[in-house]
Image (cartoon, coloured by chain):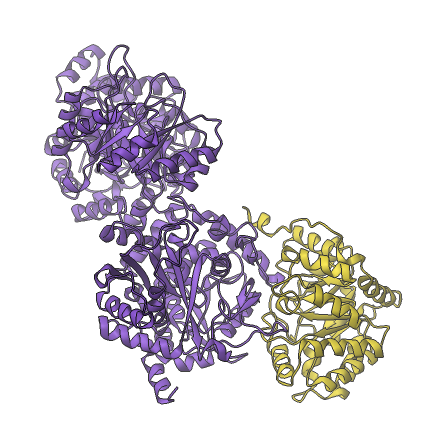
Chain colours: A yellow, B purple
Amino acid sequence: MSADAATVVAPVAGAPTDATAGAGRIREAFRRADADGRAAFIPYVVAGYPDAGGALEAALATIDAGADVLEVGLPYSDPLADGPTLQRANRAALRAGATLEASIRLVERIAAARPAIPIVPMGYANQLIGGGEGRERAERLVDAGASGVIVADLTPDEGAPFESVAADAGLAVVYLVAPTTPPARRATIAARSGGFLYCVSLVGVTGARRTLDPSIRRLVRDVRAVSPVPVAVGFGVSRPAHVRALAAAGADGVVVASALVDVLGSDGRDLRSLGRLVTSLAAATRR
Amino acid sequence: MTVVDRPPTGREGRPQASRAGVVGEIAARRRADLERELDGVTIADLRRQARRASAPRPFAEVLAAPGLHLVAEVKRASPSAGRIAPIDDPAVRARAYTAGGAAAISVLCEPHWFGARPGDLEAVRSAVSVPVLAKEFVVDRRQLPLLRARGADAVLLLAVLHPRRRLAALAAEALDLGLEPLVEAHDARELEAALATSARVVGINNRDLRTLEVDLDRAAELRGLVPEDRIAIAESGVRDETTIRRWRAIGYDAGLVGETLVRSADPTAVVRAMVAAGREPSDPANRGARPFVKICGVTDEAGALAAVRAGADAIGFNLVPGTPRELSVGEATALGRLVRSAARVDTRPRIVLVTVDRAIEELLPLAAGVGADALQLSGDEPVSTVVALAGAGLETWKVVHVRPDEQPQPVVDAVRGYLDAGASHVLLDATGGPFPGGTGRRLPGDLVAAVAREVPIVLAGGLDPASVGPAVRSAAIVGVDVASGVERPPIAGERRRKDPLRVGLFSKRAHAARVDRPVLVARPTLVHPGLLEADEAGRWGVDREFGGRYVPETLVAALGELESAWTGIRRDPAFWTELRELLETFAGRPTPLYRADGLAGDALAIAREWDPRPTPVAPDRLRVYLKREDLAHTGAHKVNNAVGQALLTRRLGKERVIAETGAGQHGVATATACALLGLPCVVYMGAEDIERQAPNVARMRNLGAEVVSVTSGTATLKDAVNEAMRDWVTNVATTHYVLGSAMGPHPYPTIVRDLQRRIGDEAAVQLAEVEGRLPDLVLACVGGGSNAIGLLSRFIGEPSVRLALAEAAGEGIETGRHAAALLGGTPGILHGARSLMLQDGDGQVVEAVSLSAGLDYPGVGPQIAALYAAGRVEVEAATDREAVGAVDWLTRAEGIIPALETGHAFAVLPRLLAGVDGARVPRPGAPAWPREMVVLVGLSGRGDKDLDSIERWRARGS
């Protein structure tokens, strides 16, 4: 088997989750931002961090400072795609008693309070699929008001069964492409992604970086060229200048995560700094 | 020195004159020489001279013997190297070569570029007793009888110098003179021309004789184009025995070495080292995969002796009236006597009498009269005949005749019927030939493979030296049988006769077919394929429910690259040869198998106390064997995988290695392998483990590895894996992640299993040598599963072998504080694969608890999970307390301090013995366990590293 053959995604039976209601809400948010002359801004909060109440406040503050879509991290014991910041926040949340159900209830509360903003939880395969297909989880997320879901360690190679149950539930499964993804595979992943496609900006784990990788411009252009869904760029994005550069490069959306957790401070409660940073990041999305 | 009357063409001053380049120039000069020297001499005169020469020595036959042989060259200069050495007496030099074991001597006969002098050939020929190759530029057919007259046994013919038809004519003429032609090629076109001749010996020269450039990969690239019924010689570019070993691995019969030997101050020593490197390996793992070879229908002394020399495992004498290989009873008796006297007692071929549809009363005296070891029934004998003969104590072989269009199942049933009746072997042959007892036709490969997967069969019919290797590689047959495929062309009205060269080559090709190809299956495997190999998606299990590749997208390309590299390596004997050599010379393999009688006695005593029922195992009938991985370099089995993956890193072209470690054993092994191969190495280790395993941390640092303390999560093995994965995600372009257990995303479980299965492959052969059979029970401890799958792999497909694993119960499974992913886990996704794991209802990974750092892991490899789910392994668990007790027990009973990990296996051993009362059988209808019981236990590592933590554990009063 050639290297290419080993990484080409097998075709899957059944519709991709881009046809779901959840995906429709996400795409509508991207459309509104675009009509407004902006890239969509997608901030991230960790459910249960610093505790259940603090997380809800942070989420609402973030949305009010200017979010188009909200990503909600589901705290996990073994977040192997995450860098030190999110590892710390995950651990703190779990220590503060975060359970999966509590995290989903957070989604429920945010959705009730700010119904216009699509919510996309992000977690790991064992939380969402584990030993089964993930049907109960997908249904529960949709009940709580989630529009899509990102699974950090799930690729379309393994995702078909979950896509199928998510499609039944009305949930978009957002896949990721990385700089290491071969070109032929990018198109296949994009075709299977629901709502939007998450473009990882760097070769590495999550975490704020000082500079953007210079090759990101080209990656964004190439991925957009083959993607039927909007492309949002994340990993390492931490400053307004990064956001401006990505919006200028043609990204349909920009994800910021670790930088927002960092700005919350060591106790995770500095909502004022969080609001300021989100405002400046959201402003930078204007093309 | 004046012999070189024309300055050799050095690399710099290379002439680019004609298409034929340097070789063309030499040939032209040679033609001019010959015009002078042979002016007026006719070929008839020279042939007369050649006939008077001493009989030719067998060049091809010598090279057809097992292994790679050295053809050592005498020359004073060469166009590529210029003057090399002023050899005054070529005979002295040649004798130095043969003293080291050279199989033949090559003598340069060209004076201008190579410095040959008149009389060199004759001097060498009379000084040695091995064949001599005349390395001449043959441009005139008269050179052939001339060289034969001077004593040459073989002659070089260069494909580059001749149009096809002339090349073929020269080869035929040489053969006619008894002069073995070696036809040499450098590229595929020349090789095609060489193969179109009748030459039996073909050379692949890494050097392009036109430009003198050497391309070291050429021999490897072209070997596959040479059919296996030719003898293949590789030439040029040998600096040391590494090249020789590689050439042997990829199937060359000989290597021709010149300059390196000529320059050497001690050529005998250099030759000796190269000859040793060329020998066919005979380590237990390779012996275990070797098919046996039966040469059937031997009709004369030459054939019988050829079979003995070829190392045949059996010789068949045909007593079937009216067939072309029929022998009288007297002839068979005489040939049998010859075989007995000619062969070494320990390697003597079995003598098999081939009969068709004779009465039982006739057969018994017949076998006794001839002195045969076995009777082969090649007719339509019913099962009852086999029962009668086997019942009379006679080894019986049965031929099953199969139509090529037959379905596998009825064939399997027929074979099984004869085996159950007591047949020692069943041969599969095609029906429809003119004579009973062999048709000379091949059965379809698919049918053979399907049958061989279910029952042990010997493939007969239509095999020859060219086809036997591929046949052995493509089906799990246990042996091959040949008659017509190794014979001289039939002469009407005469009895068939064997061709000694073809007999030799057939046996060599069959025996070598699976050497250093550990992935090839060598015997029936009676389980679901999902328990033996992953599918294309890396899934294991009867429902393919375990395994897969759950990783961040960033890693998918690297895993794809790893997968295709491994797919290639799995079938590349050069890789496995290099690895085996390192494991043998560096890592201490094969590790010994030790019979632990003290342990056995104690275990039985414990088992009896637990179980008041009369135990079926008498003390002297329980034999427990320990596979001593603790004696491998670095003190555990981990070195097998680490050295293999370090070699893999080099193949992948990556320049940095990372690894995770729990107990530190895998970290130490990886650091060791990286020190050996000069690779920078970073080891991730949980902070808690660093504290528990300080001596191993010091060892890693001394070996030059960077040890990174992991404080995230529970600061143990699982978090070290997470951190290694994060490093890999970040540095994937330059870094190979040497995963230490048979877990993780596809293809890691396969890679680690392939590298560790040597443990069980060796043990099975070592055990068969002392017990003559398979073990009844195989037991290993299991954490991630590399030691367990390494020991168990060989036995998974053997239904008579009970497999058992010991997990770490920590403080007790009922306390929830344990590391038993099989007994106390649920299906989930951990570290890239779906398997059984410790988790809560939210899918959060639950901390594993075990005093043993090597088992302190919340998951288990997917193949192990699949074996457990399918009921193919029994699983027991031992608490910390029980494991510590077992460590003490083994230490005192046997003088071996085992690793705490291994202690878990010994702790559960008595429990498994207590179960032996006929109640636990692996499949319905299987016979109850025999009174005699042979147990194989994997002693995965040494325990020095644990003494401190055991002391602390005792001090805590746990």
Observer able to see residue A46? no
**Does residue B134 sit above or below A265 in this rendering?**
above
Quadrant housing residue B758? bottom left
Q: Position of residue B342 (x, y in %)?
A: 13, 33
Q: Position of residue B474 (x, y in %)?
A: 43, 38
Q: What residue is shown at x 41% (from left), y 36% (from top)? A: B224
Is B574 or B905 nearer to us in this picture? B905
**Does residue B326 sit above or below A55 in this rendering?**
above
Q: Position of residue B485 (x, y in %)?
A: 32, 25
**Does residue B119 sit above or below B93 in this rendering?**
above
Q: Is residue B766 left or right of residue A249?
A: left
Quadrant housing residue B552? bottom right
Q: In the image as oriented, which residue stretches furthest toward the right?
A: A35
Q: What residue is shown at x 27% (from left), y 72% (from top)? A: B890
Is B117 or B450 nearer to us in this picture? B450
Q: What residue is shown at x 22% (from left), y 68% (from top)? A: B598
Q: Position of residue A50 (x, y in %)?
A: 68, 85
Question: From the image, which quarter does the N terminus of chain B lie in?
Answer: top left
Is B824 or B470 nearer to us in this picture? B824
Observer able to see residue A117? yes
Is B954 or B567 nearer to us in this picture? B954
Query: How many numbered tags mark residues here?
Result: 0
Q: Is residue B441 left or right of residue A135?
A: left
Question: From the image, which quarter does the C terminus of chain B lie in?
Answer: bottom left
Quadrant housing residue B425? top left
Q: Is residue A83 left or right of residue B761?
A: right
